[in-house]
Image: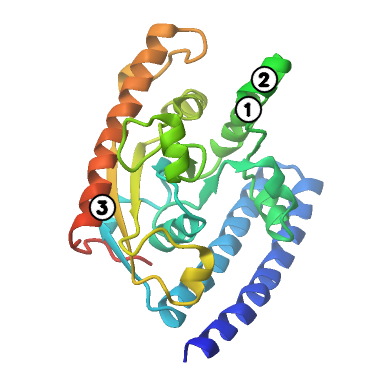
Amino acid sequence: MPVLRLILIVLMIPLSTVSHITPLLLLTLVKALLPLPGVRRICNGLLTGIAESWIGVNNWMWDHLTSTRLSIVGLADADLRRDGHYLVLANHQSWVDILTLQKAFNRRIPLLRFFLKRQLFWVPLLGLAWWALDFPFMGRYTPKQIARNPELAGRDIEATRRACEKFREIPISIMNFVEGTRFTPAKHDAQHSPYRRLLKPKSGGVAFVLDAMGPGLQAVLDITIAYPDGVPSLADLLQGRVTEVRLQVRRHPLPAHLQGGSYQNDREFRVRFQKWMNGLWEQKDADLAGLLGGDTQETAKPS
């Protein structure tokens, strides 16, 4: 009964969202009015629990109200820690990417926190929730805007540093879609991307996070997302038109030779960092081809 399932999903999403965001915003008010370290730690834990509960409801709907199978190749639960500190990198094709990552990693690693476009703050209810959970909002200025106003270049860097200062206090998974935008063939051609199925990676944001977090990060989790049926929309997922989503997960140690350098001011360091990122993306391009070209074996059960 696809229509009944869709109606149930449409009813459950706003009900779950409102029921979770209400206590979340009340806790945020307490956290703001009582900025004591002990109160902040308690509130951060409770806020994270509410967010994970909301994601858990979404994951229940995925399991019981869609027929989409999630297959994961790579890490098992023993390789992951809920109290860890991770930098998570992934390719980006669709809004479904976010739901997929939450489905795969909710309550297996710390809550994923994304760098969001500043305009997303105005998304009803969710914008406030992201703000309450300390998701950093970025301007993401174009080269033309920066050329007209060079001061804009430093705003996102400063926002990254402020966010990372907060993140040092809590277990964290900092999520970065390194391509900076969703993949499309038109964008791929306009960039003259050297990769078959990826846009060029933007290294600056990753470098700033590694610099700001320092040794507080334990590892890089590199996620490749593949859609064998073609890149879906959110409506495709909700209406049961996505047969399978495939993930390849790779865990990398933090490269020692890329810590403590200045991406902005040291050209040699910047070249080394970009070479490292390009190597990850070459592997990701090969992983994506493999995920799309053959069957995968599920080695890690999603929560």
Determine the residue positioned at 65% across, 29% down.
Answer: 141
Q: Which residue is mark 3?
A: 75
Residue shown at the point (54%, 90%) measured from the top left: 4
Q: CA distance from mark 1 to mark 2?
A: 6 Å
Name which residue lies at 20% across and 61% down.
Answer: 296
| Closer to the camera in the image, 199 or 279 | 199
Above-or-below relation of 20 to 179: below
Going from N to C along the chain, the mark reached first, 3 or 2, is 3
Point out the frontmost of discs 3 and 1.
1
Q: Dot 3 surroundings within 10 Å: few (below 14), some, or many (20 or more)?
A: some
Look at mark 2 in the image and give the residue it sits on. 146
Amino acid tagged 2: Ile
> 155 or 245, which is in the foreground?
245
Q: Is residue 51 left or right of residue 60?
A: right
Q: Is residue 84 left or right of residue 39?
A: left
Q: How is the image coloured?
A: rainbow
Asked whether the residues under the numbered discs 1 and 2 touch, taking CB atoms below 8 Å apart as contact, a structural biologist would say yes
Give x and y (percent) for residue 126.
Answer: 68, 58
Q: Nearer the viewer, residue 206 or 198?
A: 198
**If you read the primary sequence from the N terminus, does the residue marked by circle 3 or circle 1 appear first?**
3
Query: Can the viewer see residue 39 in this picture?
Result: no
Are there few (<14), some (14-19), or many (20+) residues within 10 Å of tag 2? Answer: some
Amino acid residing under circle 1: Thr
Q: Nearer the viewer, mark 3 or mark 2?
A: 2
Residue at 67% across, 77% down = 15
Q: Secondary structure at mark 1?
A: loop
Type of amino acid at the residue the image marks with label 3: Leu
Q: Secondary structure at mark 3?
A: loop
Q: Which residue is more in the foreground, 216 or 259? A: 259
Disc assigned to residue 142: 1
